[in-house]
Amino acid sequence: MKKHVLVTGGAGYIGSHACKRLFEDGYQPVIYDNLSTGHDWAVKWGPLVLGDLLEKEILESVFNDYQPVAVLHFAACGLVEESVRDPEKYIRNNIDGSKVLIDVIKAKKCPVMVFSSSCTLYGNVEQSVLDESLPVQPINPYGETKLAVENILAEERQAGGLNSIALRYFNAAGADPEGEIGEDHDPETHLIPRVISAALGQLPEVKIFGDDYPTEDGSCVRDYIHVSDLAVAHVTAMEKLITGELPPAINLGAGIGSSVKDVVACVKKISGRDFPVKIGPRRDGDPAALVADTALAQKELSWSSQYSDLETVVGTAWQWHQNQNA
Ligand SMILES: NC(=O)c1ccc[n+]([C@@H]2O[C@H](COP(=O)([O-])OP(=O)(O)OC[C@H]3O[C@@H](n4cnc5c(N)ncnc54)[C@H](O)[C@@H]3O)[C@@H](O)[C@H]2O)c1
């Protein structure tokens, strides 16, 4: 019989890609989601249990019914601006929800949890290539919630209660290369789908916030990691934790910096469409460049990205959005 893996947030963007990968690797994902930002159409590789992280009794019954060997914990609210407007929502959903989940995991003696953390934890840093030895100093409530959960997991590890890892993603992007699932957020705040929306005529223009940064072309540089590469890293981390130990946190990024102007040019090239691009002022708090140092992921997970060159990231995302639009 296939081993069950509980995937909270498995109806969301990254969680659904992880479910596909789990299924391909011989596991049976069980999706736990309240569909607040996820979609039932993205649940294709296992049963959906409709429930909230705060609903302890439903969570307990899922563990009783499926006895998962591990939990991949993606479920969270993830909008930085919303977290500034409504920090209480983020505390309740991301921290309190994770606490309930961790309590149930421990009570049910499930040994392993992989947690979705974020490079947001590093805050505004001077250096452009970030490794895990940097101090964590989030500058918004969303980042604070990720740090709070990392801290709880660190305590649990020390107490020997739960073997876990926090995977700190940079910018998740792209879509399933086979076109079965992709990104569908509302509102969409991520750069690549927004530029694609402009190419599809759904947005009137693309705005670049600042072109006077100390980068090669003056626009901000970020690290876009393909969502299918993230999925592989999750399954690998889970398997390593089932049989042994990993460091408490590992960065997951492509290790490649792409500027906003690179992304715009790549979407124009791949789509064959032109659209207006306007240069606006810098946004507060946007560092010039954030790129992952991926050495620890390579060493500990024997993992390196396969799909995270910008052309493949944009190409798979373009295919997905174009199909959705058709
Ligand atoms: N997308 C990125 O670039 C990125 C970067 C760093 C970290 N992350 C983290 O990765 C995780 C997944 O991100 P995503 O982009 O797939 O987001 P998403 O919004 O597409 O997926 C989140 C899923 O969790 C579900 N959910 C939220 N709160 C819940 C709750 N209380 N109970 C049950 N289900 C709940 C939503 O319905 C959704 O299906 C999040 O934890 C996010 O903070 C994402």
Image (spheres, grey):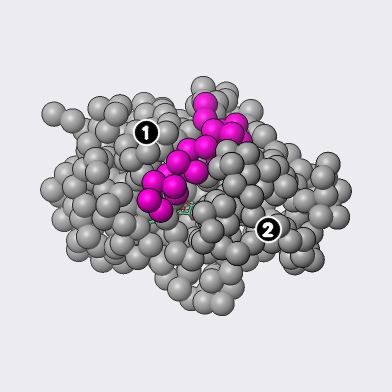
> Which image quarter: residue 38?
bottom left
Q: Position of residue 48 (x, y in %)?
A: 21, 52
Q: Position of residue 54 (x, y in %)?
A: 31, 66
Q: Is residue 240 above or below residue 49?
A: above
Three-letter amino acid code of the residue under disc 2: Pro
* Image region (quadrant) for ligand 1: bottom left
The residue singled out by tag 2 in the image is 276
Three-letter amino acid code of the residue under disc 1: Glu
Q: Position of residue 109 (x, y in %)?
A: 26, 44
Q: Nearer the viewer, residue 194 or 232?
A: 194
The residue singled out by tag 1 in the image is 178
* Number of marks in picture: 2
The answer for how far apart the CA atoms under marks 1 and 2 are is 30 Å
Q: Residues within 10 Å of mark 2 (few under 14, many from 20)?
A: few
Q: Residues within 10 Å of mark 1 (few under 14, many from 20)?
A: few
Magenta span has 91? Answer: no
Q: Is mark 2 within 8 Å of ligand 1?
A: no
Q: Can residue 247 be seen in this snapshot?
A: no
